[in-house]
Structures are given as structure tokens and as C-alpha cells.
Amino acid sequence: MEEKQTILIVEDDKYIIHFISMSLKEENYTFWTSKSVKEALSLFYANRPDLVILDLGLPDGDGMDVVRNIREIASTPIIVVSARQEEPEKIRLLDAGADDYVTKPFYMGELLARIRAALRKKENRPADQGLSFTDGDLLVDYEKRRVEVDGQEVHLTPIEYKILLLLIANRGKVLTHHYILKEVWGYAEGVEAGTLRVFMATLRRKIEKNPSRPQHIITEVGVGYRFK
Amino acid sequence: MEKISGRIKKIMYRERLIYLGRTAVIVLAAALIGLYLNRAGVMKENILMVLLIGVILTGAFTAGYEYGVIGAVASVLIFNYFFTVPVHTFAIMNPDDVVLMIFFLIVSFISSAMTARFRRQVAIAEENERTARRMSELSERFINVTGTEQIINLGLSYIRESTGYDAAVRLDGRRTDERSTDERPDTAGAVMFPIGGIARKTGEIIVFTKDRGLGAEQEIFIRAVAGQMGIALDRERIYEKQEKTKLQVEREHLKSSMLRSISHDFRTPLTGIIGDCDLILQRHVTRPEEQDELVRDIREQSMWLTRTMENILSMTKIESGADFISRREEVVEDLVYEAESHVSGLREHRRFQDSMPEEVLIADVDARLIVQVLVNLLDNAVKHTKENGLIRLNVSYQDGRAYFVVEDNGPGIEPGQEEMIFGEFVSLAGRGPDQKHGMGLGLAICREAVKAHGGEIRAENRPEGGARFVFWLNAQPAVQMEEMEEEYGGIYRDGREADYIDR
């Protein structure tokens, strides 16, 4: 951590800005704040932050526009913070390119954890090209196509393995059901809605020591999955 | 078609034969009596009277004018042959006999015409009476019938009884109510009758006559049925509307009382939060541990507000009707784990155990609502147990249902309150730390949400002490992974044995 990581906060509520910025300062991040879509975009172009925290309801437009505009030029992680909690809304944002979604009210600890995960994903990108992947007690050997938990081999079906690789490649990002279906099956239509969820449930039973407190795969109910 | 008309012709032919037979018998009997009287020396004029009686009787025992005429002509011929001079010929000597026979014929014709008309009128009167009786019975029956379905069925059964035709009813703005359910009869060869309502046409009766046509009376009767049906259906509609309005008023009432109660209940924690903040800002409390305590209070009260808000949101969602519940196939354990992560202090301050069934269960539910139900039940358990108390969540599967059991070793439910606690705004007079916030919306939502999913929830006390909440939802075990892989085009691999690492 030689260089301080930079974050752009886009939010129009001064109380939220206050407590987020205080926490970020505490964690040693550099940050900018903006209260409108225009300001956010110009700050983004000028500073190229490592991560964006984005509120949806802004005075001069929808946060959705910010996501689209940023995605046109960069793959910077975007964490959406919003009071809107309807699943279709979340899915729309995630499919548009947002990485993660936090609903108000949220706890700062949770937001910080997600920020760390999103930044780690950015760092880890090159390392993923390697021959294996380790995360805590989980080991994936790409070459031998072998998965171990706590040193014990686990048999995964081909589809489960494909899903796991997809999640690892996108760690820190919430993948919607639709996205996973399209990536793993090649098409999303015609595959039953519950199918993916069943695969995920069995995959989790196989690689999580305690499925009720998952260490690797987090379920975002109604939206999708995220690799921690 | 031809077969039917042929059969009708045959029936009519047989009837005619019977009447002709009767005519013959009566006329012959009269002739025999005449012959007997003649031998006894009675005058021929009187014998003619006997024959006249025969003709009149013929009119009485047959239907139609023509039999009387046939009888009269036959009688005249018999009279001419047997009783006029020269006997046993059809020749006539005496001009008086000719006059006699002519008058006989005239009297016979008039009398048989009159008898025939009389008979017809009697028949009409009988028919009228029958119709009138049927009509009055019809209207009486329609008064007592309620329910659209029953009204329609009654009308259709009446039509079938009186005309022999099957019929169906099509209500405007509703799907067809077919009498014969298996195939949708084509309306070709059917006659339609409108069902009138007070303001507008409500629908139509379709009578499947198969081109046989309807008699005038049948038509009148069907129209009467249509009229009665229209009135009954209108009555039904008005009644329904009235009920709906009543329900709406009730709901409005509930909503306003809920709003009142909510604002009341929000006032308390907000006062607490503001007060705590003031204390900290004004430096009345200086000891760090005291400050921490105040901040913890603020947090706790804010969390309570958050939870309550979440519950209110769910409540409005359920109350606005089934359309607002977005069901999807969800894996049951996902919901359970999600709920567990939302209950603060569940693992930290209580002994919490959970268990899942072997099979992966899938339920068609609104994920958010069911998570809310579980959160509320677990929250409730945390609230009613002491530090380090026991809380257990157990999910099991049986016969198409997923059973969720949440139990604790707290003080339990007051006997007799097992039903009451699911009511809105009810909260038990317990000694929990949050008890001052009395809005028992949580369990009410549990009941409504479970009910909205077609399940049931109940509360009971465990024999060993503590409360137990059980609810079930429709669910089914997921198809086995290996089968699915084949079905969805995965390459089959050696990993046949399921390798579950834990549990």
C-alpha cells in the first residue's frame, strides 16, 4: 500500500457524505465528493479514481447515467448505494455495469468490506492468469482442474466448476442470475429460474465449511451471487 | 333430421289409428244398440238419436274435428242401410228420411266442431296453467339462489328440463361457463338470447338447438329464464359491489389506525435518540463508558426503527394484494441464511443452532417477504430470551411442504395467547428490553406473508419451556445435480458420488 487508493463519492445527502468520508479518512483512502451527475463525471475524468461510490437519486439526473458514462471509458469498480431496494432495479444496474449494490440503511463496516473486495478484484486481475487460485481454505488448480477445500479434494460437476471459475474471475463483483446463465450455459432463455440457484446451493454445500456463514460465495437474494 | 321427422310422422300416424279405432268402436256400438232397439220396435227417429249420441261421444273421445265428421258420415250410411226403407240397401224411398239424415249430419257437424274447439281450449288452458306454474316456480327459485355459478346452473337446468336442449351462458367480460365442459360447442345451430341487466346487457344464453328450432312457448320460457337470470345476476353484482365497498372502508379504517399507531410508536425511539445526542453534545456525560452506552442506545433504537420500517413496507406490500408479491423459485436455504445474517446478536449473544434438510428445497416465493418472516421470528426469539439463551431454527421437508420451526427457551407464550399474538399491534406484556416499543407488527406480517403464499403459521409452547413457531410453505426437492447436468448439456463426469464436505 505505497500509494493511497482513491475513491469518488457521488451522493447528495450531506449526512451520508459526512459519515462515509469520515470512515474513508480513517481507512486512509483519498477521496473526492460530488453532488451531481455533471460534477461526478468531470471529477471522474479529471482524477480517474480507483473506485466510485454512487447514490442513485441525484438532483440533476439518475445515477444510472453515471454508470453508463463511466463504463464507456473505464472498468473502474462502481458500488451503488441507494434507498431503492427493488430487485429489478438492482439487476438493471448490475447488468449496466455496476459492480456491487448496497441498500440504505447500511452499516459502514459492510460498505468498507465491499470497497476492499472491489479494490482487491482490481489488484488481483493479473494474478488470476496464474495456474492456481487460493482464497482461505479454498484452492483451485486450473491446470489439473482440481478443487480442494482444506487440503481435501472436492468433486465438482463440469457446470459447478464453470460457475466457480466465473465467480473467481469476477471476484468482488455481484453477478446477476441472468449474467451467470448466459456465461455458463451460453443462453439465459429456457433455463429454469430455479436451476442456477440449485447449482449454487450444491456448489456452496461442497466448498463452504459452514454454508450458513459462507466464506467464499455470498448470495444476494433475488439478485445474484458474489465471490468474496 | 329426416329420421326425426320420420319418427314424428310415425307417432302421429299411430295416434290417428287409435282415434279411428275409437271412432269405429263407438259408431258400431251405437249401431248395435240401434239394431237392438229397432227389433224391440223403437222408431227410427229415436235410433237416429242413439247414433247422434255416438257421434257426440266420438267427439269427446278423440282429438280433432275430422273424427266427428267421419263418425257422422259412417252413422248416416249405417242408418241408411239398416233402418230406412228399403232396408239393407242404400236407396231411399221416403223424402222425410233424406231431410232427417241431412239434419242429422248438420247437428253432428256442429256438435263435433264444438266439442273439438272445447277440447282445444281445455288443452290451451291446461298448458297456460302449467306455464304459469312453472314461471312462478322459476321466479321463486331464483329469489333463493345466490352466487353467479348457482344462478347460471339453475337457469340452464330449467331450460334443459323444459326444452330438452343444452344451453350455455356467456357473461360479458367473463369467460364462458360451459354446460358441457369437455368440448366447446360451436355456436352454429344455436339460438342466442340476451340476458338483460338493469343498465345494460349482462350476457347471453346460448341454446344449442342444433337447427331444430324452438316453439313459441319454448322461446317465451327461455326469455323468461333470461329475464329472471338477469335480475338475479344484477342482484348478485350489486351485492358484491356493496361487499367490496364495505371491505374498502374497513381497510381504510385499518390503514389510518395503523398510521396513527406508527407515528405514536416512532415518537418514542426518536425522542430517545434526540435526547441521547443532546446529552453527548452538551457534555453532560463525560465518562467514556457512559458515552458508549448512550451511543449504543442510539444505535439500538435506530435499528428498531429500521426494522419497523421494513415491516411496514412488507405489510403494505401484502395488503395491496397478490399482484404485488413477486414470486420466483428460490432455494430455501438461501432465504434462511440471508435471514440469519440480518438478525443482530443472534450468534453473538445467543446459542443459535440451525439445521437444513438433506435435499435442496425449492419454493415458489417472494424472497424478501419470506426472509422478513424468518427475520421477524428470529428477532422475536432474540427479544424473548436472555443472554446466551437457546434459539433453534430447523427446516424439514415432508409431502410437498417445507416446514420451518423456530424455537427458543425463553418464557414462552402466555397460555391462550397463541392466536392473539398474530394480530396487528398486539404485543405481549413481556419483560424484553425493547418492550416499550409496543408495535407487534412483526408477527402479524409473518401470518399475512405466509398466508399470502398459501401456507400456515402457528405458535405454541414447548413442553420443556419456551416458544415454538412453526410455518410451512409449498416446496419441492430440486432435481438431482447429475440428472440436471445431462439435461442441460454438461459433459458427464466420474463424480457420481456426491461429495458433501460438511454436515
Image: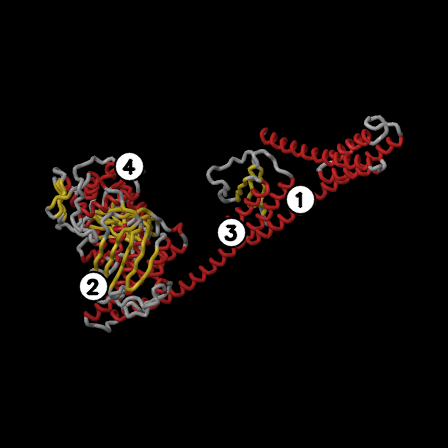
Residue at x 26% of width, y 49% of height: A220
Label 3 or label 1, whichever comes before in sequence order? 1
Work out whether A115 lies above or below B187.
below
Give the mark toward the camera: 2 or 3: 3
Residue named by callout 4: A187
Q: Calculate the distance from the C-alpha at mark 4 to the C-alpha at mark 2.
A: 46 Å
Neighbour class for label 2 at 10 Å: few (<14), some, many (≥20)?
some
Q: Secondary structure at mark 2?
A: loop
> The disc numbered 4 marks a residue on which chain?
A
**Residues marked 3 and 1 touching at CB (< 8 Å):** no
Rendered location of residue B22, percent (x, y): 70, 36
C-alpha distance separating marks 3 and 1: 32 Å
Task: Check residue B349 in the rendering and tell me which mark sits there, or answer none.
Answer: 2
Q: Position of residue B327 (x, y in %)?
A: 34, 48
| Label 2, label 1: how far apart the Cα atoms are | 88 Å
The tag on residue B127 is 1
Q: Which residue is mark 3?
A: B147
Residue closest to the far right:
B95
Same chain letter for marks 4 and 2: no
Q: Secondary structure at mark 1?
A: helix
